Image (cartoon, rainbow, N blue to C red):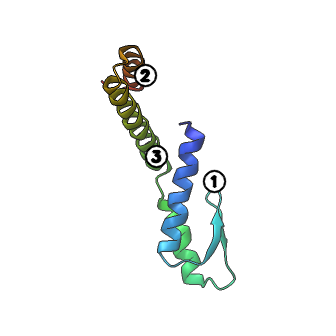
Amino acid sequence: MSTASGRSEALGRLHEALCAAGIPIHGVDTEGHISFKEEATAAQRETGAALVKGFDWAAAVEAALRRRKYGQLAQLKAAKAEAEAAGDAEVAQLLQNEAAALGSE
């Protein structure tokens, strides 16, 4: 997963946080600029701006990258178990190597 992909996922989390706070928005861009809907009050706009200002991009991107990595590791381990169950030691070893390269073991 690239940093850009991690930032995209983090952006989705920021969007969700704004919506969960009841702030009527069309969206938010990667620079943190919010496109508010017409009905957004001044207080909602201030709250939205505060949420964006306090959003920890680095932590959100790192969390997204970590979630993706663990998902990939789980897939590799499941595929390795299937290869072992099928008696294909060569494929199992290749999958083990991929998992190790990804930082599994």
Nearer to us: label 1 or label 3:
3
Residue 102 image offset from top left, x and y in percent: 42, 26
Number of callouts in the render? 3
| Image: 62 above or below 47 | above
What residue is drawn where x is 47% and y is 73%? 20
Characterize the local packing of mark 3: few (<14), some (14-19) or many (20 or more) Cα atoms within 10 angstroms.
Answer: many
Q: Secondary structure at mark 3?
A: helix
Residue mark closest to the camera, 2 vs 1:
2
Q: Amino acid at mark 3?
A: Ala
Q: Is residue 93 above or below residue 19?
A: above
Q: CA distance from mark 1 to mark 3?
A: 15 Å
Task: Tell me the quarter of the picture where residue 73 sits.
Answer: top left
For the residue labelled by badge 2, is the local secondary structure a helix, a strand or a loop? helix
- The residue that mark 2 highlights is 98
Nearer-N-terminus badge (1/3): 1
The alpha-carbon separation of the residues under discs 2 and 1 comes to: 32 Å
Distance between the alpha carbons at the discs numbered 3 and 2? 20 Å
Foreground pick, 18 / 96: 96
Q: Earlier in the sequence, mark 2 or mark 1?
A: 1
Residue to which mark 3 is pinned: 64
Contact check, label 3 and label 2, Cβ < 8 Å: no
